[in-house]
Amino acid sequence: MSILNDISENLQKGKAKIVKQLVQQAIDEGIPAHRILDEGLLSGMSVVGEKFKRNEVFVPEVLVAARAMNMGTQLLKPLLAEAGVKATGKVCIGTVKGDLHDIGKNLVKMMMEGKGLEVIDLGTDVAPETFVETAKNEGCQIICCSALLTTTMGVMEEVVQKAVEAGIRDNVKIMVGGAPVTESFAQKIGADRYTPDAASAADCAVELCSA
Ligand code: B1M
């Protein structure tokens, strides 16, 4: 569909205003929000990621693409929420210490809020102690950790250990995700769940909160 290609191409060029207009146009044309996200915005960001890897684009270009992505996802936010499905539960989410990537984390947050969960967003570069103290003080059922760098994935294991040390491990579930994270890694570090994308993370959180 050409409008989805246009969204992808303009995102790659970092044209945030045009991306916003095109996303609105796609919504008005009745294209489902998940297709606009997957085939427009995420597809464009994936091309940027490949070019970044090959040193064909650099941090400034990636940042403007990220800004365009955020402007587009803000418009999709209310549409990605499932009408009528309202779960209850409280979670805290953040990108782990040393890691500044927040687009995926923000999508996970958006999807969880769409399911009715209360989400405390700790932002990026979050220390293991902060996840654990927040869960303890705020009574969160789940700690959600996102990591995009192979060098920061290990912080997730520290979150699990700190939760044990704080005596809350039996009362709080720990979910992990992000591009380099896998099911076997999650098992190895003692996390409760790995999910590969924002939608499955939200479903999983609802399931854990209802258990
Ligand atoms: Co960075 N970066 N980056 N970057 N960046 C990657 C991750 C990289 C793969 C690029 C590459 O080389 N191809 C590479 C990591 C390599 C590695 O570790 N193996 C990389 C690098 C190296 C770096 C720097 C070190 C570059 C440098 O400075 N030399 C630096 C690190 C800074 C730091 O964090 N300390 C850096 C910086 C940046 C920017 C600031 C420029 C920018 C971030 C802007 C921002 O986030 N606000 C950026 C970006 C945008 C990327 C790429 C291009 C795109 C990431 C993204 O947002 N994808 C990325 C390449 C790529 O991934 N193809 C890359 C879209 C997003 C929706 O996907 O976050 O994976 P993702 O989220 C998915 C799932 O993973 C999942 O749900 C989402 C989809 O539904 N998910 C979860 C995420 N969290 C979850 C949690 C869950 C469950 C699911 O449960 C709790």
Image: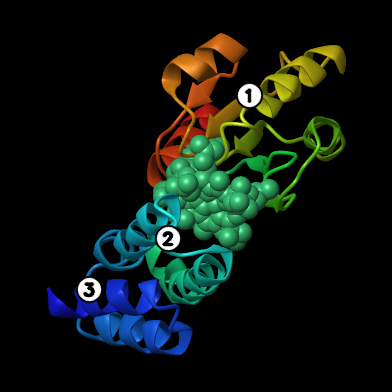
8 shown above or below 39: below
Q: Residue at x 66, y 26 (%)?
A: 156
Give the amino acid type for the residue marked by disc 2 in the picture.
Ala
Dividing the picture into quadrants, the one containing residue 42 is bottom left
Q: Residue furthest left?
A: 1
Residue wearing tag 2: 81
Q: Residue at x 49, y 29 (%)?
A: 181
Position of 2 compared to 151: left or right?
Answer: left
| Dot 2 or dot 1, earlier in sequence | 2
**Residue 31 x %, y %:** 21, 73
Dots 2 and 3: beta carbons under 8 Å?
Answer: no
- Decide which of 121, 10 is in the foreground and name it: 10
* Secondary structure type for disc 2: loop
Q: Residues within 10 Å of mark 1 (few under 14, many from 20)?
A: many
25 shown above or below 200: below
Q: Is residue 87 visible?
A: no
Dots 3 and 1: beta carbons under 8 Å?
Answer: no
**Spatial separation of the CA atoms under disc 2 and disc 1:** 23 Å
Residue wearing tag 1: 173
**Residue 211 x %, y %:** 53, 24
Label 3 within 8 A of ligand 1 by Cβ: no
- Decide which of 2, 166 is in the foreground and name it: 2
Q: Residues within 10 Å of mark 2 (few under 14, many from 20)?
A: some
* Secondary structure type for disc 3: helix
Q: Is residue 161 visible?
A: yes
Mark 2 or mark 3, which is nearer to you? 3
Numbered badge on residue 99? none
Position of 195 compared to 152: left or right?
Answer: left
Give the amino acid type for the residue marked by disc 1 in the picture.
Lys
Position of 55 compared to 149: left or right?
Answer: left
Give the amino acid type for the residue marked by disc 3 in the picture.
Leu
